Image (cartoon, rainbow, N blue to C red):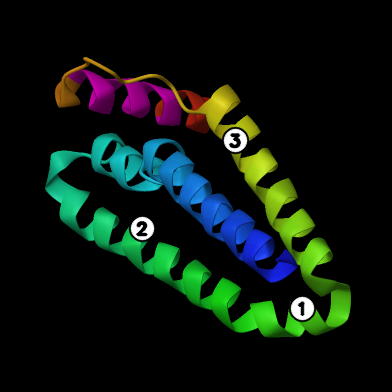
Amino acid sequence: MGDVVHAAISTASVIIYFCCFVMGFGPVPNILCAEIFPTRVRGLCIAICALSFWIGDIIVTYTLPLMLTSVGLAGVFGMYAVVCLISWVFVFLKVPETKGMPLEVISEFFAVGSSAGQKN
């Protein structure tokens, strides 16, 4: 009976994680990349963002077995949880809300932010 309970908990956990990720943090990089770059270079920049996303995904995939043997399952997912928490704090503090804003306004907003950083 213990194996069935563990399997049910594992399955429910994966489903809950997937639902939360898809509705929450998952689309942020793709949506943000589509909004912050000027129209003339948007396609190239989105491609570079997608490439970096997939490179990060490959790194996580290939380092998981090594990390499992060195720090164990709890350690690996503890590290992942810390990275997710840091990412959430970054998005909460640094990524502006763009809901309902036209792309032109968003482009101007990020252009002002980047030019202000260059003056300093």
The structure residue drawn at horizontal position 83% and vertical position 73%, both measured from the top left corner, is 72
Look at the image and tell me in which quarter the N terminus lies.
Answer: bottom right
**Dominant secondary-structure state across the stretch colored magenta:** helix
Residue picked out by circle 1: 68
Amino acid type at circle 1 is Leu
Discs 1, 2 touching: Cβ within 8 Å: no
- Quarter of the image for residue 48 reads bottom left
Mark 3 or mark 1: whose residue is earlier in sequence: 1
Rounded to the nearest angstrom, the CA distance separating label 3 from label 1 is: 24 Å
Q: Which residues are magenta?
A: 105-114
Point out the frontmost of discs 3 and 1: 1
Q: Looking at the rendered structure, which numbered label has been put on residue 77?
A: none
Q: Is residue 47 left or right of residue 20?
A: left
Instruction: Identify the element where label 2 is drawn.
Output: helix
**Nearest the camera: 115 or 105?**
105
Say whether disc 1 or disc 2 marks the residue closer to the N-terminus. Answer: 2
Residue 120 appears in the rendering: no
User: What residue is pinned by disc 2?
Assistant: 49
Which residue type does callout 3 highlight?
A: Trp
Question: Circle 3 sits on which residue?
Answer: 88
- How dense is the environment of label 2, judged by Cα within 10 Å: few (below 14), some, or many (20 and up)? some
Answer with mark 3 or mark 2, whichever residue precedes in sequence: 2
- The amino acid type, in three-letter code, at marker 2 is Cys
Q: Is residue 30 rendered to the left or right of residue 10?
A: left
